[in-house]
Image: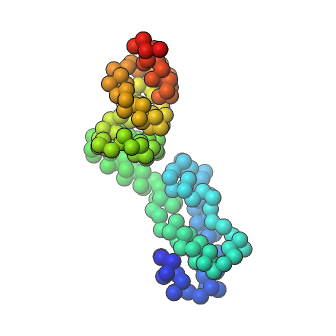
Amino acid sequence: MTLDQIITGIDIREAKSEYSRLRKIANKRLARLGVSEFAESRTYQNWKKGFAPLKSITTEKQLYKALSEVDRFLGLKTGTVSGARAAQKAFIESMHERGYNFITKKNAAEFGEFMREVKKHKDYKGRDSEQLVDLYKTAKDKRIDPQSLAQNYETWFKHEKTFEQQPRSNSVISFDDFIEGADAREGRK
């Protein structure tokens, strides 16, 4: 529902009543998401503050905007635990159809965060998604924290050949630690 549709469709009293009703539903869904395996999901993280009580909304414009926001949240498939599970299952199945069987329930959220973080970097341009999926798998295989690698994508980009040739770590390490170790092994420090 757009803000214009809300404003033209109902009066202020109805808007207050509808907001209170929808707010209660939305905040219950958020509470359930927050204690589920989807507490780290993008949907939960974006909305975890919940929706403000009606008494804190002081203007008509704020009310209609809040009503539009709560309606938008309630329209999300991933706004419920069952919807988030279904979306996760569909994502994993899609990855498996493409041959990426290493994406599982256990690492699907981590993989999604990795992809979002890498795509923030300017050096990401020119890389296709398949290369990034392979990079994630390589990081996991070498026991390098994928989020650390994603945050340091420009450094990886400069050390790509070194990265691929380095042995697997004995424990999970940050990408910075991996690069320091690679530099030391190659006598650059």
Locate residue 65 relative to residue 83 in the image: left or right. right
Above-or-below relation of 100 to 188: below
User: According to the image, what is the colour scheme of the structure?
Assistant: rainbow
- Residue 46, relative to residue 1: is it above or below? above
The percent coordinates of residue 44 (x first, y second) are: 55, 55
User: Which x, y percent locates residue 22?
Assistant: 59, 73
- Measuring 42% from the left and 31% from the top, which residue is drawn there? 155
Against 34, is 96 above or below? above
**Where does the image place residue 166, in percent across and percent down from the top left?**
37, 19
Residue 7 percent across, percent down from the top left: 54, 83
Residue 103, quarter of the rendered image: top left
Return the residue nearer the eye: 149 or 74: 149
| Residue that extends furthest to the left in the rendered view of this protein | 98
Residue at 58% over, 66% down: 26
Can residue 183 be seen? yes
Q: Which quarter of the picture shows residue 117?
A: top left
Q: 174 left or right of 103?
A: right
Q: Nearer the viewer, residue 127 or 17?
A: 127
